[in-house]
Image (tube, helix red, strand yellow):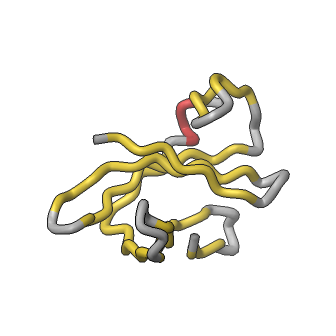
Amino acid sequence: MICQHRADGTIIPIRIRMTDDDGACQEYKIRAYKDLSYRGSLFEMPDAGKVHSSGIYPFECKIECFGHERTIRLFYNSYEHTWKLASRR
């Protein structure tokens, strides 16, 4: 994950790298994003169910994947400094 941390504390996702099913590293530019942290601190996390935390920042992002626009959700955990991905078709 490549992102920008601004002086006012906001995070801007810029680019994501993932390994595909064939083991090749794919890089996707984030074409548009929406910060969803305004919705409160209860989130549906991938692989973890519902989580209540003020240190999690959710983003809905649009990427282009093999000529198709896809919407993904990214979650940044500021306590663990990790990113999680949830795909939406």
Residue 29: x and y, percent? Answer: 37, 74
Q: Is residue 55 above or below residue 68?
A: above
Q: Is residue 51 above or below residue 55?
A: above
Judging depth in this view, the residue of 23 and 78 nearest the camera is: 23
Q: Residue at x 15, y 67 (%)?
A: 67
Residue 88: x and y, percent? Answer: 35, 41
Residue 79: x and y, percent? Answer: 84, 51
Q: Quarter-wise, where is residue 52 in the image?
A: top right
Judging depth in this view, the residue of 46 and 56 nearest the camera is: 46
Judging depth in this view, the residue of 26 and 81 nearest the camera is: 26
Residue reaching furthest to the right: 79
Number of numbered discs overlaid on the protein picture: 0
Q: Is residue 78 above or below residue 22?
A: above
Q: Residue at x 65, y 56 (%)?
A: 83
Q: Quarter-wise, where is residue 37 in the image?
A: top right
Q: Is residue 27 above or below residue 21?
A: below
Judging depth in this view, the residue of 29 and 13 nearest the camera is: 29
Q: Residue at x 42, y 60 (%)?
A: 21
- Residue 25 lies left or right of residue 47; in this view the side is left
Question: Which image quadrant: the C terminus?
Answer: top left
Question: Which image quadrant: the N terminus?
Answer: bottom right
Residue reaching furthest to the front: 22
Q: Residue at x 45, y 75 (%)?
A: 24
- Residue 85 lies left or right of residue 67; in this view the side is right
